Amino acid sequence: MKFEIRESNLNDIEFITALTWQMGYKTTDEKIQQRLAEIAELSDQCFFVAEKHKKVIGWIHAFRTLRVESGTFVEIGGMVVDEDYRGKGAGKALIDKIVEWSLKKGERKIRVRCNVHRPDAHGFYELLGFEEVKEQKIFDKQIA
């Protein structure tokens, strides 16, 4: 199945919000629009959507990052494909777009973090050549 992969635009907001809900993140159109506006201003970040029959059925966000201990690489910040389109090539097409974007940025490594409760996603990434390199816990602290 063929999908159009393109940069997102304001007409995509409702689709992006609905897909984000499928990931388990309860957000609003307004918050998504604000975040995408910020991402659009940053040259080391990208956000693409997968479209089929003029409907957004997936999205991916990635950014170039620098770590003192491990250098630079591209990290996938998030990715989701609509439940009805999983296993049909949209996810691979989105990853391929990030590979293309990464190479244009001069990066040769892509990293993705994946929740331990998503074993199907683990298998997906492994099929595309990603290798598990470590497990970790993430800690948040809300500050005033």
Image: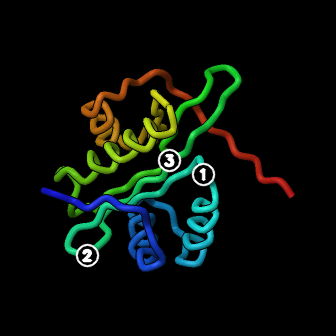
Between 17 and 103, the residue placed more toward the observer is 103
Disc 2 to disc 3, how far (Cα)?
A: 23 Å
Q: Pointer 1: what residue?
A: 43
Of mark 1 and mark 3, the one earlier in the sequence is: 1
Rendered-image quadrant of the C terminus: bottom right
Q: Is residue 98 left or right of residue 34?
A: left
> x, y percentage for residue 25?
50, 62
Q: Pointer 2: what residue?
A: 54
> x, y percentage for residue 79?
41, 52
Tell how many labels: 3
Q: Which residue is drawn at 50% across and 32% down?
A: 106
Between 95 and 84, the residue placed more toward the observer is 95
Q: Is residue 43 left or right of residue 81?
A: right
Disc 1 crowd rating (10 Å Cα; few below 14, some 14-19, many 20+) is few
Residue type pointed to by label 2: Lys
Residues at circles 1 and 3 in contact by the CB criterion of under 8 Å = no
Of mark 1 and mark 2, the one earlier in the sequence is: 1
Compared with residue 1, is residue 64 higher up or lower down, i.e. above or below?
above
Colouring style: rainbow
Residues at circles 2 and 3 in contact by the CB criterion of under 8 Å = no
Residue type pointed to by label 1: Ser
Q: Pointer 3: what residue?
A: 62
The secondary structure type at the circle numbered 1 is loop
Q: Which residue is drawn at 39% across and 73% down?
A: 15
Q: Which residue is drawn at 48% across and 38% down?
A: 113
Farthest left residue in view: 1
Q: Residue at x 45, y 72 (%)?
A: 9
